[in-house]
Amino acid sequence: MNEQIPRVIATETALALIERLKAMHGALMFHQSGGCCDGSAPMCWAADEFRTGASDVRLGTIGGCPFWMSESQFEYWRHTQLIIDVVPGRGGMFSLEGPEGVRFLTRSRLFEDDELARLSPVEHGGD
C-alpha cells in the first residue's frame, strides 16, 4: 500500500459549497489564515485575488482548488491532516462563503506513524 496520503481533505459538505462558489466566482484557491483579524480559518478566494509568496506552501487541493498555508504555520501543522468542513455562522470577512451564512472550518487529525512516509509533498509558492 504505497498510496500517497493527502495533507488536506474536505468533507462532502465542504466540497458541495466549493462547487457552488466556483459556479458563482470561477476558479478558487484557499489559504489557511494564521490568526489576526479572522482567526485561524481557511479563507476562500477567487484564484486571481490572492497572491502567494515564497513563504507559502501548497499542501494539496480540495475540490480542484489549491490549498496554501504559510511555511511558518506549516512547521506546526506538518504532522497533521487538515480536514476542511463547513459550519453555520459568519467566518472571515474576506472569505467568499461569508454571504452564504456558513463558514469553512479546519478540523485536524494527527497522521499515524505508518502514514508519515507516504505524505504528499508540498510545493513552495512564489509571485
Image (spheres, grey):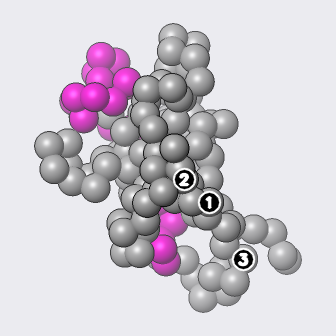
Q: Which mark is residue 125?
A: 2
Position of residue 98 relative to residue 83, above or below, is: above
The quadrant of the image that shows the N terminus is bottom right
Q: How crowded is mark 1: few (under 14 residues within 10 Å), some or many (20 or more)?
A: few
Residue that sits furthest to the left in the current view: 37
Q: Dot 3 corresponds to which residue?
A: 118
Instruction: Report helix, strand or loop for mark 3.
Output: helix
Amino acid of disc 1: Glu
Instruction: Report helix, strand or loop for mark 2.
Output: loop
Q: For the magenta stretch, what is the residue range? A: 77-102
Q: Dot 1 corresponds to which residue?
A: 123
Amino acid of disc 3: Arg
Cα separation, mark 1 vs mark 2, equals: 6 Å
Count of all numbered marks drawn on residues in the image? 3
Residue at the image position 84 percent from the left and 76 percent from the top: 2
Q: Position of residue 16 (x, y in %)?
A: 56, 28
Q: Position of residue 48 (x, y in %)?
A: 51, 26
Quadrant of the rendered structure where residue 70 is? bottom left
Position of residue 42 relative to residue 59, above or below, is: above
Can residue 76 be seen in the rendering of this structure?
yes
Q: Which of pointers 1 and 3 lies earlier in the amino acid sequence? A: 3
Instruction: Report the front residue among 61 and 126.
Output: 126
Residue at the image position 31 percent from the left and 49 percent from the top: 33
Amino acid of disc 2: Gly
Instruction: Report the front residue among 38 and 13.
Output: 38
